[in-house]
Amino acid sequence: MPENEPETCRAIREAVPPAPFQPGENEYFDNLDKSTMVCIRSGGDVIPNTRRVTGYPARVYCKPDLSRR
């Protein structure tokens, strides 16, 4: 974890630990919903990923509120 990680990212990581669920599994969607809610509650913006590539495979990303570092 980076030392200068935004508070939004830290809050999501604490509330929703990384999980091995694959897209299409029920648990995956529950985990995605929970992380999306934490992102929004923490002041972040949920950004859809329209260009999924190997390095960035997620369907959505949380853009943290960088003013809250």
Image: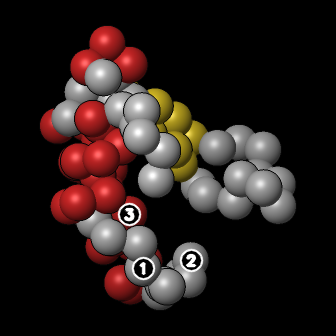
In percent of width and height, residue 64 lies at 39, 30
Q: From the viewer's perspective, is residue 1 above or below residue 51?
A: below
Query: In percent of the image, x 17 and y 37: which residue is there?
Result: 41
Q: Residue furthest front?
A: 3
- Tag on residue 32? 3
Kindly identify which residue carries mark 2.
23
Residue 13 vs residue 34, the one in the foreground: 13
SS under mark 3 = helix
Residue 4 vs residue 66, the one in the foreground: 4
In percent of width and height, residue 29 lies at 39, 72
- Whether residue 34 is visible here, answered yes or no, is no
As measured in the structure, the alpha-carbon distance from the residue carrying label 1 to the one carrying label 3 is: 10 Å
1 or 2: mark nearer the eye: 1
The residue type indicated by label 3 comes to: Leu
Query: In percent of the image, x 38 and y 85: which residue is there?
Result: 26
Q: Using residue 64 as the reference point, say whether residue 49 is left or right of it.
A: right
The residue type indicated by label 2 comes to: Pro
The residue type indicated by label 1 comes to: Ala
Q: Quadrant of residue 50?
A: top right
Q: Using residue 47 as the reference point, say whether residue 45 is left or right of it.
A: left
Kindly identify which residue carries mark 1.
19
SS under mark 2 = loop
As measured in the structure, the alpha-carbon distance from the residue carrying label 3 to the one carrying label 2 is: 10 Å
- Whether residue 28 is visible here, answered yes or no, is yes
